[in-house]
Image: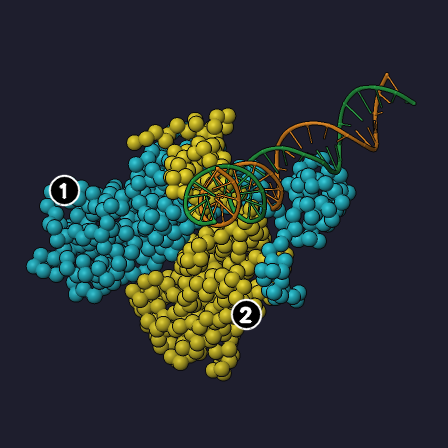
Chain colours: A cyan, B yellow, C orange, D green
DNA sequence: CTCGCATCTGACAACGTTGTCCAGGCTCTA
DNA sequence: TAGAGCCTGGACAACGTTGTCAGATGCGAG
């Protein structure tokens, strides 16, 4: 095993970080600088013999082209950025992966970062990516004002927003039909006899949360049901508060007989609460969850395809870069109601 | 709403991609180039009045520093790379996020890519990141030969391997105690009376898979049980084949009474198969799974802390970059057996 | 009023690569 | 054998930034 452990070689003061350049390779191979460049980039106009000499020098020195310099010269970075909320959320993993695959197919690298649902951090991240001169940006908005991106877009950074629309600028958006999905989910509960249905969702400043709430209200209204204040709980996602919200809806003289959960994190906590209840309570959740079919009862959900969201957005991004695309558009992907049992429980009145 | 939709502005031929540079800002503010640089970087030695003029020019032109040029000049990129297997796998999401947080705390950006468990792609990706001159690299190995990284490490790229050891080079490694975890998990089943225990895991060329198999064998041997060939199934992870493997173990004259599942993907499929069985079969899985406590019975697992793996690795990476660290080390994090019911079922002989 | 000093500013080179362009050597033909 | 044309290789500038260093400016003191 070769000795790679001599870290002292790399400490400041010694030859730390010194890397061979094309100039070094050229000197060693006894050729000109540009000839090395030609070999490295597979350009024509180099005799096999020269090419071999250059290649040997490259291998001997462990040369690797410095893409920073290349980018500086060429203008394009062949990389795109993805700003999302939290990579650890199972909803975003497949989305990110899908964007990566599309990028790879176009020879681009993906740089992604988490905004942690903080608008300032989203901006900081997006602008840092722009400073790196990514060719394009896929953004899952945390904030609701994206005018800070105007100079970038004008300068040629392709931009697509996913999952939630851009704020105060006109740009491509790819999202799921939150309104329709929630309406269908709640209508499903109503169709199974429920009238007192609770809604637990995120802060209405988040577009998807607001849309789902709107869908809930629409379904209730369509059925002629007047929603009572105690039935909706907004802006709670941390387990502790979701738990309290659910328990409150389920207690009192007129408890809800069914709950619609506004996203996967809420759903998970509500499942736990319902598992502790004496009487069965129906549940439909927005977002699918792994193992949902193995619960008792199976979990009925309004599913969105996060990978498809990512793929669609990324493809649109590259079409912007091709120049194929002209007008910004809003693309809404349908959701799918998957019945597994929890949404078909009758009211336990 | 301002008009950002005129993509024609950005088509080749027009002023596509033209961005203001410091020179432009300097011209507009009527100052020298270096003065702009000073303002942008918050260096001292600029009168408030001059600074204000420069700042106005920056805002007016929508200038943003080109980090590629900066990197070229300064040598450091303030970014690190992460090569993992698949971002969509719930095991890697938290790991990636943890690395990102540590990077952020050090003012660095994280670039990550998926190798899709393909050694060639891992190499391609790692070298692409090196060409971008990342300061450091966190690698979850797909292959078993990492000598291709030698020139990079020698050139000063800090490197830490996670989850699986590096192949044929001496480098920092952070991993979970797969051997011990599997041994404990299997011993747990034995302690509950099982003797015919099946093992379903990934290809033994993957280090973690081999270690878990070794742990299984050790536990069995410790108990004086001779493992029959039909009890182990290696190299299967896709649901279809896992299903078949499990069903085979459970049929025949001498079926297993318990199964140890080698990773989260295997576990999920095995749960489904077991749910269809007439008699109860005990199960312990490696890796925790969301909602594991809500299954019937609850899923007993050997849990590893993927976020801690990531955090530990990233911190070690930055200590390498500080020059604080000298000799490569192998850090093994303990696993934790979480009993929830499925591993405590008695044999149904 | 002049000198010296401190403070602020700008000219210039360099980072490593690629695009442009020209020189030199070769082959082929007349 | 001379001229035309092709092929290979190299010199040089440019990309946008930062570090170095020297010049300019203003102020106070002698």
The spot of residue B155 in percent (x, y) is 61, 56
**Badge 2 local density, few (<14 within 10 Å), some, or many (20+)?**
some
Give the mark toward the camera: 1 or 2: 2
Quadrant of the image containing the C terminus of chain B: bottom left
Above-or-below relation of B24 to B348: above
Asked whether residue A208 is in view, the answer is: yes
Using residue B145 as the reference point, say whether residue A194 is left or right of it.
Answer: left
The spot of residue B246 in percent (x, y) is 44, 65
Residue at mark 2: chain: B
Disc ID at residue A169: none
| Closest to the observer, A87 or B273 | A87
Residue located 18% across and 53% down the image: A233
**Mark 1 and mark 2, same subunit?**
no
The residue singled out by tag 1 in the image is A221
Residue at mark 1: chain: A
The spot of residue A313 in percent (x, y) is 40, 40
Residue located 53% across and 55% down the image: B135
The residue singled out by tag 2 in the image is B329
Contact? badges 1 and 2 (CB < 8 Å): no
| Closest to the observer, A59 or A132 | A132
Asked whether residue A271 is in view, the answer is: no
Above-or-below relation of A62 to A173: below
Residue located 47% across and 41% down the image: B35
Using residue B184 as the reference point, say whether residue B324 is left or right of it.
Answer: right
């Amino acid at each position: 095993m070769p000795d790679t452990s001599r870290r002292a070689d790399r400490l400041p003061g010694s030859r730390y970080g010194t890397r061979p350049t094309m100039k070094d390779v050229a000197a060693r191979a006894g050729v000109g600088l540009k000839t090395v460049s030609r070999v490295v980039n597979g350009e024509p106009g180099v005799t096999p013999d020269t090419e071999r000499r250059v290649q040997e020098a490259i291998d001997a020195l462990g040369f690797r082209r410095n893409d920073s310099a290349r980018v500086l010269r060429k203008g394009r970075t062949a990389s795109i950025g993805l700003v999302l909320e939290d990579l650890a959320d199972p909803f975003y993993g497949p989305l990110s992966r899908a964007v990566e695959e599309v990028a790879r197919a176009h020879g681009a690298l993906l740089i992604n970062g988490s905004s942690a649902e903080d608008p300032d951090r989203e901006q900081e991240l997006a602008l840092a990516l722009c400073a790196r001169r990514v060719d394009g940006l896929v953004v899952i908005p945390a904030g609701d004002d994206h005018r800070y991106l105007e100079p970038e877009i004008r300068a040629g950074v392709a931009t697509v927003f996913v999952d939630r629309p851009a704020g105060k600028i006109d740009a491509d958006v790819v999202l799921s039909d939150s309104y329709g999905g929630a309406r269908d989910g709640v209508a499903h509960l109503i169709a199974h006899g429920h009238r007192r249905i609770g809604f637990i969702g995120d802060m209405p400043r988040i577009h998807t949360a607001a849309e789902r709430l709107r869908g809930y209200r629409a379904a209730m209204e369509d059925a002629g049901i007047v929603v009572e204040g105690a039935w909706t709980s907004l802006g709670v996602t941390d387990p502790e508060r979701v738990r309290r919200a659910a328990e409150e809806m389920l207690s009192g003289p007129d408890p809800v007989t069914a709950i619609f959960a506004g996203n996967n994190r809420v759903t998970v906590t509500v499942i736990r609460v319902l598992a502790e209840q004496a009487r069965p309570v129906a549940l439909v959740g927005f977002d699918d969850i792994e193992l949902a079919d193995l619960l008792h009862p199976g979990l009925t959900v309004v599913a969105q395809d996060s990978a498809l969201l990512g793929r669609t957005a990324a493809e649109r991004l590259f079409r912007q870069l091709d120049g194929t695309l002209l007008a910004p558009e809003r693309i809404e992907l349908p959701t799918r109601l998957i019945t597994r049992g929890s949404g078909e429980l009758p009211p336990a009145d």
